[in-house]
Image (spheres, helix red, strand yellow):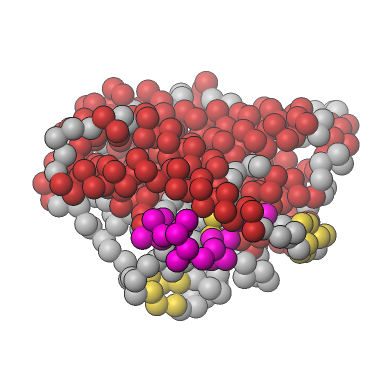
Amino acid sequence: MALNLNAINFRSPKCSAFARLTPPATFKSSKFIINSTLHYGSRDVKTAKKPFSHPQHEVRVQVTHSMPPEKIEIFKSLEHWAEKKVLVHLNPVEKCWQPQDFLPDPASDGFHDQVKELRERAKELPDDYFVVLIGDMITEEAIPTYQTWINTLDGVRDETGASPTSWAIWNRGWTSEENRHGDLLNKYLYLCGRVDMRHIEKTIQYLIGSGMDLRTENNPYLGFIYTSFQERATFISHGNTARLAKGHGDWKLAQICGKIASDEKRHETAYTKIVEKLFEIDPDGTMLALADMMKKKITMPAYLMYDGRDDKLFDHFSSVAQRLGVYTAKDYADILEHLVRKWKVENLIGLSGEGQKAQDYVCRLAPKIRRLEEIARGRAKQAPKIQFSWIYDRQVQL
């Protein structure tokens, strides 16, 4: 079950240090994350219902365009570097896998037999696995929102929609590769016969209509730190759905999830390389950005997931993923430690006073998360079962 930090006494001696660093939050699995609650510390938050969106959609007091103008010049100066070091992590279309490579061929005389085989394998998969796989797919299908978000980042946005800059080429190429993930999982789920596609399709529409606010402030420092973390989280999540599918005897689905995971790993490499370069040329600014993003928490892009009925659908989906080990609080801490090592954060020198404080905060954070997780797990009780519209209202334990 998911770890509810709100149930922990943050005034106790064991929790006091962490409580000073971050408000109570709910550790959830997620495109996958530990999700904090939608209330953040002392910042003012306004709540408003939006048409065709999650009924609990919260309109935050947003900070925008927080990057000083002189920092934009850094990204302009990195155009040639990005062409040589970042664009190499996009595969040529002719060498890319396509969804049809893993699905029954509708033009084949054996199409119906292939679909029958797919359905026979899918019968061995439990309902809780489908809940997680569907949540993964819905998150991937919101790709229009993610491209829009990256195009808000100052200094790297696609100004015209067909800009020839390296940053714009990356964004469009990354989007085109990510687009295949939702396509493939969607078609698999359609063919398997185990899920309610209409409720799934409604969830996708609600999610794209709701948008998202990742609190990156149009700032590419924050944006690329977020994507570095998120792409690794997605790599882990899809890798674990592949492992579980193989364990249930569906080798074809395991191959599908594994292919998606390999894309996420390659994208993670590109984004972490960008942040590594920022640490090289602006260590203090990048260090402050990393601490800022970790204090806000890496929020799942699909945190406004909604099917028209369940106001807490994201929380419920996340709880199932946490219980199955697809993505957990431990994974969140592991990713943070991995990035700290990757970017050599502990070895940075010459930082300002604020930069040193940020460095100390980030380097001490993962162990605190783990200790808090242990406390929450020790107090966790048997989770209830709830209905999921995605699987015809069958019940699944959280």
Magenta residues, start to end: 1-20
Rendered-image quadrant of the N terminus:
bottom right
- Front-most of 324 and 138? 324
Is 244 magenta? The answer is no
| Residue 122, percent from left and from top | 82, 39
Name the residue at the left extreme.
70
Q: Is residue 382 left or right of residue 351?
A: right
Is 18 magenta? The answer is yes
92 is higher (above) or lower (below) than 26: above
11 is higher (above) or lower (below) than 47: above
103 is higher (above) or lower (below) than 205: above
Q: Is residue 134 left or right of residue 170?
A: right
- Front-most of 210 and 9? 9
Say which quarter of the image contains residue 295: bottom left
| Residue 233, percent from left and from top | 51, 40
Rendered-image quadrant of the C terminus:
bottom right
- Front-most of 287 and 259? 287
The residue drawn where x is 39% and y is 34% is 339
| Residue 127, percent from left and from top | 80, 50
97 is higher (above) or lower (below) than 67: above
| Residue 174, percent from left and from top | 43, 37
The residue drawn where x is 45% and y is 59% is 13
Q: Is residue 379 left or right of residue 228?
A: right
The residue drawn where x is 14% and y is 43% is 352
The residue drawn where x is 64% and y is 58% is 379
Residue 380: tell me if it is visible: yes
Residue 34: tell me if it is visible: no
Q: How many marks?
A: 0
